[in-house]
Image (tube, rainbow, N blue to C red):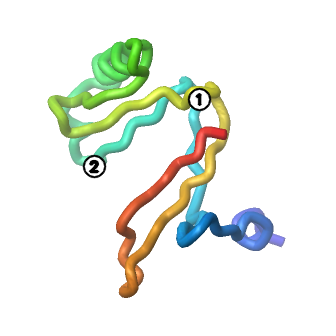
Amino acid sequence: MEILAYWKVVHKMEIGNKEIVGRVAVDSGQLLITDPCYLEKKSNESLYEEVCKKTTSPKRLGQVLNGLAFATSSGYGDGIYDVFAEKDEEGRVISIEIRFD
């Protein structure tokens, strides 16, 4: 069985009205949420440094890229974490949740 098809069968689950829709890999203990078009405007090294400043601060999260992105520590370090989506009646995604446990 194809790995992706197997994953969809085995990992199909829901929490309340949220359904698991994918997974995200974390290899630096951090996660960045942004529109990909903003990544071209900053070098990888300077962006990584900016993200690290936020994720190692006392709050362990915050806005980066002049407010165009959000960075957070995963709390548990590296791993692969489930992504859940909540959809409205028309099937549009209205929220996502990433569980770091």
| x then y, percent, for residue 79 | 66, 35
Q: Left or right of 1: which side holds 101?
A: left
| x then y, percent, for residue 75 | 57, 27
Residue at the image position 39 percent from the left and 70 percent from the top = 93
Label total for image: 2
Q: Quadrant of residue 95?
A: bottom left
Q: Earlier in the sequence, mark 2 or mark 1?
A: 1
**Up-down: is 83 above or below 78?**
below
How many neighbours does mark 2 have within 10 angstroms: few (below 14), some (14-19), or many (20 or more)?
few
Residue at the image position 27 percent from the left and 38 percent from the top = 69
Q: Quadrant of residue 16?
A: bottom right
Quickly name the residue at label 2. Answer: 35
Give SS at disc 2.
Answer: loop
Q: Quadrant of the N terminus?
A: bottom right
Q: Nearer the viewer, residue 1 or 19?
A: 19
Q: Left or right of 66: which side holds 78?
A: right
Residue at the image position 36 percent from the left and 42 percent from the top = 33
Q: Left or right of 22: which side holds 57?
A: left
| x then y, percent, for residue 61 | 38, 26
Residue 66's label in the rendered image is: none
**Looking at the picture, which amino acid does disc 2 mark?**
Asp
| x then y, percent, for residue 32 | 39, 36
Quickly name the residue at label 1. Answer: 27
Q: Quadrant of residue 92?
A: bottom left
**Up-down: is 28 above or below 24?**
above
